[in-house]
Amino acid sequence: MLETYLPMFLMFAVAMLLCCVFFFGGALLGEKKPSPGKLQPFECGNDSDGAKHMKMSVKFYLTAILFVVFDIEVVFMYPWATLFKGLGWVGFATMLTFIGALLVALVYVWKKGALEWEN
């Protein structure tokens, strides 16, 4: 039974060892010259002066949610594509129904204007 888990344990041990080597190696070998610029938090290139919380457009969140919803279809289509020959017409009809539902959802989102960035 131990032989079954030995490769996983070795992989975990190597990963932990590499993490420790990189962490402590960077701490020991890295430069230690603090400056005012290095001590300030990095805000993706923006100056960190002013308000800390900026309002973001809802379009970013809507786009992310739509991406996740329509990207999950690939997760379901991949196993279907690999098992296509064994599923027969029932599997084909099921996938056509699934793709049809996704197309209806895409048309609905399009008609509602969720894909329009300017509005």
Image: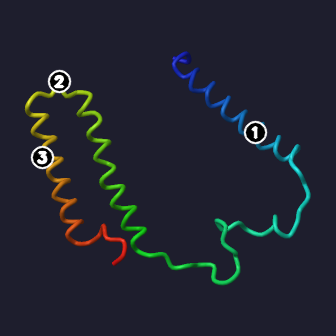
Mark 2 and mark 1 residues within 8 Å of each other at the beta carbon: no
Q: Amino acid at mark 3?
A: Thr
Circle on res. 109: none
Instruction: Pick whichever, 79 or 106, lies toward us.
Output: 106
Q: Which residue is mark 1?
A: 20
- Quadrant in the picture for residue 75: top left
Q: Which residue is mark 3?
A: 97
Give the mark nearer the N terminus: 1 vs 3.
Answer: 1
Q: Which residue is mark 2?
A: 85
Circle 3 Cα neighbour tier, 10 Å, few/some/many (<14 / 14–19 / ≥20): few
- Quadrant in the picture for residue 37: bottom right
Q: Amino acid at mark 2?
A: Lys
SS for callout 3: helix
Distance, label 2 to label 1, CA atoms, is 48 Å
- Quadrant in the picture for residue 12: top right
Q: Residue at x 44, y 76 (%)?
A: 57
Q: Is residue 59 above or below residue 33?
A: below
> Count of labels shown?
3
SS for callout 2: helix
The picture places residue 1, in percent across and down from the top left corner, at: 51, 17
Q: Is residue 99 above or below residue 34?
A: above
The picture places residue 119, in percent across and down from the top left corner, at: 33, 78
Q: Residue at x 11, y 27 (%)?
A: 88
Relative horizontal placement of residue 53, taking residue 27 as reference (left or right): left
SS for callout 1: helix
